[in-house]
Image: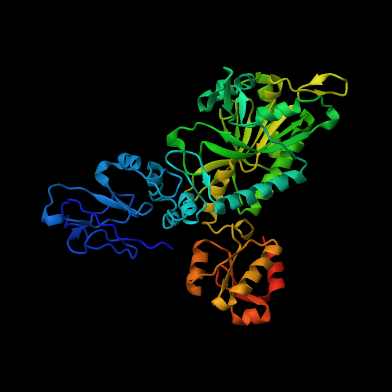
Amino acid sequence: MRSRTSVPVVARMAADRTGPRGWADPNYTMLGKRASGCRQRPPAGLDDRRPARIDRPHGRVPHLRRYYHDDRQRRVVPWSRGLRAAASTSKGPAGDGRGLSLASLRDRVPCPAHPQRNEHMDQHDHRSLGNRLDLFHIQDDAPGMVFWHPRGYAVYRLLEDYIRGQLRRLGYAEVRTPQLLPRDLWERSGHWEKFRDAMFVVDAGDGRQMALKPMSCPGHLQIFNRRRRSWRELPVRFCEFGACHRDEPSGSMHGLMRTRAFEQDDAHVFCREADVEAEVSRFVGLLRRVYAELGFADCAVALSTRPPLRAGSDADWDWAEAGLAEAARANGLDFTIAAGQGAFYGPKLEFALRDRLGRSWQCGTVQLDRVLPGRLGTSYVAPDGSAVVPVMIHHAVFGSMGRFIAMLLEHHGGALPFWLAPEQVAVAPIAREQAGYAATVVDGFAAAGVRAVLSAGDDSLARRIVVAHDEQVPVMAIVGAREAAAGTVTLRERDGTQAVLRLEDAAAVLAARR
């Protein structure tokens, strides 16, 4: 844990004798001298900001200024500059867990309808968790771009491998498509007209324009189109962990929830009309199973219908909206109608999860599309030998990988399930004499597929237990002289319960745990 240092501050300020002289906060940090000083209450709705003690040098107080202490930056910020000015002077943008932003200030306003959410609002924000657990950060000079640290990227890859395995079992073939694609392709697909303002465009050396892909759909159509396909091959299922870029407005970005660079668990199914209900049912079953295993018992579902700016005929839209609604009812989904919120090529079912403040974030989605395949010349050979345009089903279980990790962090308060923890076990020798046996325990766990780290050093055992708890390591394996002699380990769980097991048994038990 990092110790809080006292930062000397010299500022002019009028004494406010009307308020209380002391604030009952055991974590209160005093800035400046202990002698004369005064503190003023922050504005309503931001009571969780700790007041800063300000010196009055030489007893002169020419004018009034109000200050508060920003914990995440450990610095004093004057209220008199205004919230917008304070945000502009931040050392880190919203999303890195340290910087001050309008969004972070707004998030601190208590929620009257859910007072239980207010007490731990800050420490359970995914941005604070990302900083405290050393998972990721976002910089001012790369807004909306995530820097994944080793611990954070370990979680990322575990989640990616998990959904990759789920899709593989359902018959999806993983593909990879380019990041840069020519403007001509985006114009033919319709994305240039719809998404041009949100696309990062690059001028190629030969005079052509290229664009970083905002989604993977046209690339998957190019793979399907590379050879003639028969109706007997359908459904064809592709999946990709596609890296996408969208030039989101700066005011809309929010940590991992909304970024400019992100990766999706993108999947596309090419099928006949008769296959649509079965394929949507397969997806809904997958989404329910995955969400339940990750701790999300429920999610809100909305059917987004045709937007004003769209492609395709009204007959295509009538068929797609009716077909998707029927598939949703067949799967027992209770959905609302989001009129006009569909994609430009088709309607979609959106599955939204709520964060700790009750805000809704779309994660999973399934969309019906009869537009893009026709625009890009996609077809299969029907039983009568004719060329037929397939139905294209777009879907994602997580949506943005970063957003889903943010939801997981907030939902679990940073204490991720055992199988998702970047380090599952911290092995701590009681004394230096047991360091050799502790290394043997780490190797034994690693051989069983358990992610274990050695927690040695000069700190006391109690201190190392605290550090492991702060880093949300699920299990401590404590070894002393008795364990070293008997070939055992003492497993200490997050709740403090302990069990003594032989090393082989402990490795087997942990390897089987989810």
The quarter of the displayed image where residue 32 is located: bottom left
Left or right side of 249 for 189: right
Question: Which quadrant does the N terminus fall into?
Answer: bottom left
Residue at x 69% of width, y 42% of height: 284
From the top left corner, tell me how far across and down residue 103 is, in percent.
41, 43
Q: Which is nearer the eye, 339 or 445?
A: 445
Residue at x 34% of width, y 63% of height: 27
Q: Is residue 74 above or below residue 147?
A: below
Residue at x 60% of width, y 52% of height: 154
Q: Does any portion of residue 321 appear in the rendered image?
A: no
Left or right side of 467 for 39: left
Q: Which is nearer the eye, 110 or 507?
A: 507
From the top left corner, tell me how far across and down residue 111 is, in percent.
41, 50
Q: Is residue 427 above or below residue 321?
A: below
Q: Does any portion of residue 82 appear in the rendered image?
A: yes
Q: Is residue 320 above or below residue 110?
A: above
Left or right side of 280 for 190: left
Q: Which is nearer the eye, 279 or 452?
A: 452
Left or right side of 408 for 319: right
From the top left corner, tell me how far across and down residue 11 is, in percent.
20, 51
- Direction right: furthest residue: 384
